[in-house]
Amino acid sequence: MREGNYQYHQAEKEYYKLLTLEEYKSMMSRTTSHSDDLIDFLNAHQDELKKLLEYTKTQPIIDPEVYDPKSKTQVKSIQINSDIYERFTTLQSTKFPHFRLNMLFSQCLLEFIKNMNDL
């Protein structure tokens, strides 16, 4: 069923815009030029993109559950081996200063829960 420049698709219960041949050709030529620009950009910056990918492989992956803004946070006082804590904070401050300690602690606890539940 057609109405104006739209056609109703009964199975999906939606209207789809119909394009004239001229509109389709102009849209395809714009798409082609955009993809050519994209390919040119990727070729020009290939080395930087490879470095970026290598860098992201060395970064820890933080589970979205850890930084969910809807979750509540609690202040807890725990006892930790001082040598392990010192090594952990040194590692965090030298290699991962963009992560907060509480986020890394939460991620460690979450990974422990997931690993131990799988046993």
Image (cartoon, rainbow, N blue to C red):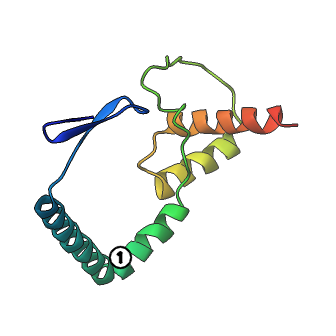
23 on left or right of 45 = left
Compared with 36, 28 (above or below) is: above
17 on left or right of 86 = left
Furthest toward the right, the residue is 119
Compared with 93, 85 (above or below) is: above
Q: Name the amino acid type tagged 1.
A: Glu
Which quadrant, please, contains the C terminus?
Answer: top right
Compared with 53, 45 (above or below) is: below
Residue for point 56% across, 39% down: 63
Residue for point 69% across, 33% down: 80
87, 3: nearer the viewer: 3
> Residue 46 at x, y = what percent?
36, 80
75, 18: nearer the viewer: 18
- The residue pinned by badge 1 equals 48
Q: Quadrant of residue 111?
A: top right
> Residue 91 at x, y = what percent?
56, 54
